[in-house]
Image (cartoon, coloured by chain):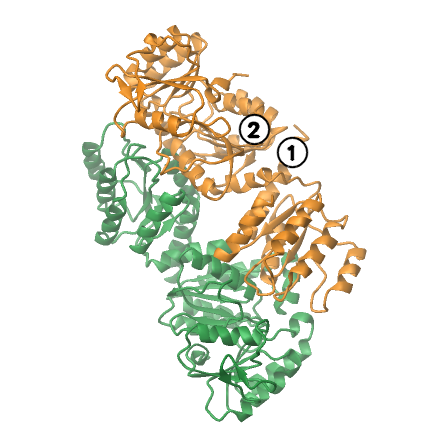
Chain colours: A orange, B green
Amino acid sequence: MVNLRRFFQPRKIAIIGASRNPNKVGHVIMKNVIDGRFIGEIVPVNPKADYILNRKVYPSILKVKDEIDLAIISVPSKFVLKTVEECNRKKIKDVLIVTAGFSEIGKVELEKKLRVYLDKNKMRCIGVNCLGVYDSHNNLDTLFLPRYRLRRPEPGPIAFVCQSGAVGSAVMDKATEEGHKFSKFISYGNATNIDESDIIDFLGNDEKTKVICLYVEGVDDGDKFFETVRRVSKNKPIIALKGGLTEEGMKSTVSHTGTLAGKKEVYLGVFNQTGVIRADSLEEMFTIASLIEKEIKFKGNKLQVITNGGGYGIVSTDNISEAKNIDMADLTAATKKTLRKIFPDTINIENPLDLLGDATTERYRLAIEACSNDKNVDGIFLIALYQTPLLTTDIVEVISEAHKSTKKPIIVVSTGGEFTEILSESLEENGLPVFEYPKEAVIAIDKIIWWEKKRKTL
Amino acid sequence: MVNLRRFFQPRKIAIIGASRNPNKVGHVIMKNVIDGRFIGEIVPVNPKADYILNRKVYPSILKVKDEIDLAIISVPSKFVLKTVEECNRKKIKDVLIVTAGFSEIGKVELEKKLRVYLDKNKMRCIGVNCLGVYDSHNNLDTLFLPRYRLRRPEPGPIAFVCQSGAVGSAVMDKATEEGHKFSKFISYGNATNIDESDIIDFLGNDEKTKVICLYVEGVDDGDKFFETVRRVSKNKPIIALKGGLTEEGMKSTVSHTGTLAGKKEVYLGVFNQTGVIRADSLEEMFTIASLIEKEIKFKGNKLQVITNGGGYGIVSTDNISEAKNIDMADLTAATKKTLRKIFPDTINIENPLDLLGDATTERYRLAIEACSNDKNVDGIFLIALYQTPLLTTDIVEVISEAHKSTKKPIIVVSTGGEFTEILSESLEENGLPVFEYPKEAVIAIDKIIWWEKKRKTL
């Protein structure tokens, strides 16, 4: 395994190409490292400046006396190799190169020379043509996008490995807004020396990371990828979206990250064999991840639907029936008898269990209790539509209490505006996964259950 | 065509079963009619009250002297038929019955008797077991859900016809939060007398309605439905989600709205033949509708992708390539030459056109201008990721100006948190459709273009 620790826990960082101009990448990176409250030391390097952001600037990395753990390089592409050579002379073996202008614009030879040098000198390089890394647990923010435009996530269990910087930043920005929490974000661009497999391998052993989300355009070393993701998938779910699956999409990957995308069937086959969960869209990645975020584990695949909206029960039943890895539960006769006794005649005791539009909070409590004690039920698909007047806000406590007292997962679906959002947020804070619509919830459950089964065969 | 005008533009409404108890449906309805600023007169009927919400109460509808256009009935199910008979004697031919407890709980005979009476006396009835109607243009709100839990939408072009009250209210609540605007919302429950076809027929002629969204569980009169939706689809798109498509989902429809759902293949076949756009999920309904909301019309199916995120370009290209009714445009040699001249070498002139992470607002302006003047381009799929620092906020004006000056549709995709949301809202206000992710945008375009083609064959 390639040790990437210094990329996330450096004590001293050199920023080579640091700039006084706020529009320059070398300035934004330095500002973000500072604003991100990096606990170590920052050493800016630039031959043409004395001070940047109140810090003394060195004219060359060779003039720095202290030991440096990580060099962030944002000099123009033609100076990158020379800068890397200097880093090597200074015994800096870990370099993060954000500079673009290599194979992605046809300069294959320039990148090859760089790769050969890095490999030969046993250096580790993230990049080139990348956005940088972000580590929420270690307060390290090397991303070159302004913090007011791209909100940084709070510490949490998701690691996001992203070949494309723009995909990474846009999707993480939105996911952060939605409340997802991240351990690390790594944009690795052209994968000149360290590739997706090295990063996944490292994250497989990272305690803070419980789930790995991956956006990948092309894999150069297929065997390494296969071996790595299979090994990591045994213990940690990897949720992947492959960019360039179609012939037309594939053509564009060359000019983006300099990689050839490869056949759809090959990728999907590899994902399937190695237990990698396939996301069908960008938005799906974190929807699936949210079940792991909330530490949801299914022991079986039979779901009981409880709802106060008949139509929602029906749509959910449709979705569950169409999913490959989940089934509708069949309540035991004993549970049915219990429920028949306590509920009015207008309620049909079946699956979905429709508590009707006049459902009270108490009705929910009784239904959840009875169903989660039923041996035929592996998880509860709980639809709570707060538009109906008799559902009091202490439904939050009722669901949260049930979540604490039962080992069976409760997955909540609530659709609505502001009133609904407030209650959903409270539930999320109490550890429950809440989805906005039945379909996305079913997809997430279906894929996580698939992985739980698959991992045992790896 | 059944004339439903009085359900939406009544001058005088009787509320039979009005109540002083704020927890009762008959109270909530009356309060909402008042709070909704109904411009006509409200006549509460209840034998046990003198005044409700400061209005004089009549002990029986027969005691009311004035002419009544519409009676809203929320008395217990066993009194419904008697109440309807009284309405008929009072010459009220339009009744909205929210009361539940008919065929959906097995009381098929009770509902049949009611139906026979309604039909025989040429009365029109929306319900039973429904949530009511809402008309934003006429300030009529008969829904029995509190307004603080269910936000009412602003006047706009979407009519939402919904067999299930819970689906209707939850989904409309969320859609309103997202900024969608509605002409009418009609929950029709068991369709005892007026069914989905009657409502769709009426909405087909409603000037305020530009698109009809439909959630349906079961259709009793298949021939009537086929004939109606085919006729209406010629001029107005109908976007439909069928609840109970799977065998297990179907079973539940009987106990929900008392209807038998019918085979999946039959429904999808009918939708396909009659030009009804099929929504695959609740959330998809309004995503598709938003293109009609913004009056987007495609003259052809070739899209040019413009992006500042390479990965987004690739993912969008994948999505477009997989869609059945859209293709990637191929810029003319002249356009390519123009763009080659004005853009730096690092930009590849192709489709997707990646303006790169250092894209400026001016670069977007030039790209949109050149592409929308290209005869090979029918629409622009514009990805704008605002996380990058050089994209200034006047991008909103640039895109809005282009939208005004070109007849070709511009579809915007922007993913992100607060900063992004503010810019997206501005664009929406200027008439542009904005989506959060490429896939949902592609699905909407694909389905609308399918309908544009299909309608010509109807």
- Residue B365 vertical position relative to residue B40 in the rendered view, above or below: above
Horizontal and vertical percent position of residue A302? 70, 47
Can you identify the residue that label 2 sits on? Answer: A208
Q: Chain of mark 2?
A: A
Q: Residue at x 46, y 91 (%)?
A: B66
Q: Chain of mark 1?
A: A
- Residue A51 vertical position relative to residue B376 in the rendered view, above or below: above
Q: Amino acid at mark 2?
A: Lys
Q: Who is closer to the viewer here, A280 or A142?
A: A142
Q: Quadrant of residue A204?
A: top right
| Kind of element beneath mark 2 | loop
- Residue A228 vertical position relative to residue A394 in the rendered view, above or below: above
Side of A95 where A210 appears, left or right? right
Q: Who is closer to the viewer here, A267 or A332?
A: A332
Q: Are marks 1 and 2 in contact (CB under 8 Å)?
A: no
Can you identify the residue that label 1 sits on? Answer: A454
Side of B417 where A237 appears, left or right? right
Horizontal and vertical percent position of residue B293? 36, 60
Side of A454 where B353 appears, left or right? left
Q: Amino acid at mark 1?
A: Lys
Circle 2 residues within 10 Å: few <14, some 14–19, many ≥20: some
Q: Are marks 1 and 2 on the same chain?
A: yes
Q: Quadrant of residue A290?
A: top right
Name the disc covering residue B48, or none: none
Q: Is residue B176 visible?
A: yes
Horizontal and vertical percent position of residue A435? 55, 49
Q: Compare marks 1 and 2 and give the one earlier in the sequence.
A: 2
| Kind of element beneath mark 1 | helix
Side of A335 where A92 appears, left or right? left
Circle 1 residues within 10 Å: few <14, some 14–19, many ≥20: some
Q: Is residue B245 visible?
A: no
